[in-house]
Amino acid sequence: MECFQRFLMNLAMDHPRTLKTTSSFNEENNMSITLYQIADDYRDILSLMESDSDDPTTLHQLVQNTLDQLQLDDQFTDKALAVACYTRELELEAEAVALTEKSIRNRRKALESRSEFLRNYLITQLQKVNKTELKSNQIIIRLRKTPARIIVDDESMIPDQFKEVETLTHIRKNWMQEQLRLGVDFIPGVHLETGVSLTLR
């Protein structure tokens, strides 16, 4: 079982599009990916974060406070490993949801594009035969004039009074970092800060 879970883990990291794993659905049909063996006590604590709540911050604080109570040396390693495994499960689930979102978004755009094309087709055909209304026992088609709207033919000819100038300031962080790396001692208003990242495999 452990080898199979490791295989799924490697597959998810190397080929996220081909990730196929057993998914359980709760009452709200939310996908849940389980790839690691985590002690029930730890999983029960961590799963509190998935509870429905209008105040997720409070739930996260509850989980943290509960975990912080497990500070004995013989418990810390188990706790840290359990949290790491659960974190990776959440990340993989988020990746799976993101792929689903992308697929659904592309599907929506395709449907909207097709319906817009067919609407314009119907308008053109009705205008060709000088009809403004058709109906059946299922649907009614009507042509109606829309409110007038401005079409810009040549922006350069529009008087300034009808123009609004927007100023966008972009902070060139990459360039500042390069200058500091090359030896510039100080740039007013900024400072370099080194953080810590966490690697889970």
Image (cartoon, rainbow, N blue to C red):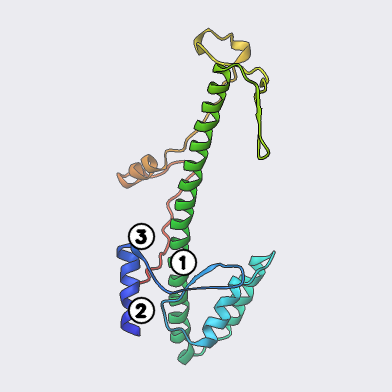
Q: Secondary structure at mark 3?
A: helix
Which corner quadrant holds the N terminus? bottom left
Residue 66 percent location from the top left of the image = 60, 81
Q: Earlier in the sequence, mark 1 or mark 2?
A: 2
Q: CA distance from mark 1 to mark 2?
A: 15 Å
Label 1 or label 3, whichever lies nearer to me, is: 3
At label 2, which amino acid type do we have?
Answer: Gln
Instruction: Tell me what residue is drawn at x 47 percent, y 42 percent.
Output: 110
Whole-number angstrom distance, CA of label 1 to CA of label 3 = 12 Å
Mark 1 touches mark 2? (CB < 8 Å): no
Residue corresponding to mark 3 = 17
**Visible residue check, residue 71:** no
Q: Would you call the spot at circle 3 few (<14 residues within 10 Å), some (14-19), or many (20 or more)?
A: few
Q: Secondary structure at mark 2?
A: helix
Q: Residues within 10 Å of mark 1 (few under 14, many from 20)?
A: some
Residue 79 in picture, x, y percent from top left:
48, 83
The disc, 1 or 3, on the residue closer to the chain's N-terminal end is 3
Identify the residue position indicated by label 2 in the image.
Answer: 5
Q: Quadrant of residue 122?
A: top right
Badge 1 is on which residue?
Answer: 93
**Residue 7 in picture, x, y percent from top left:** 30, 75
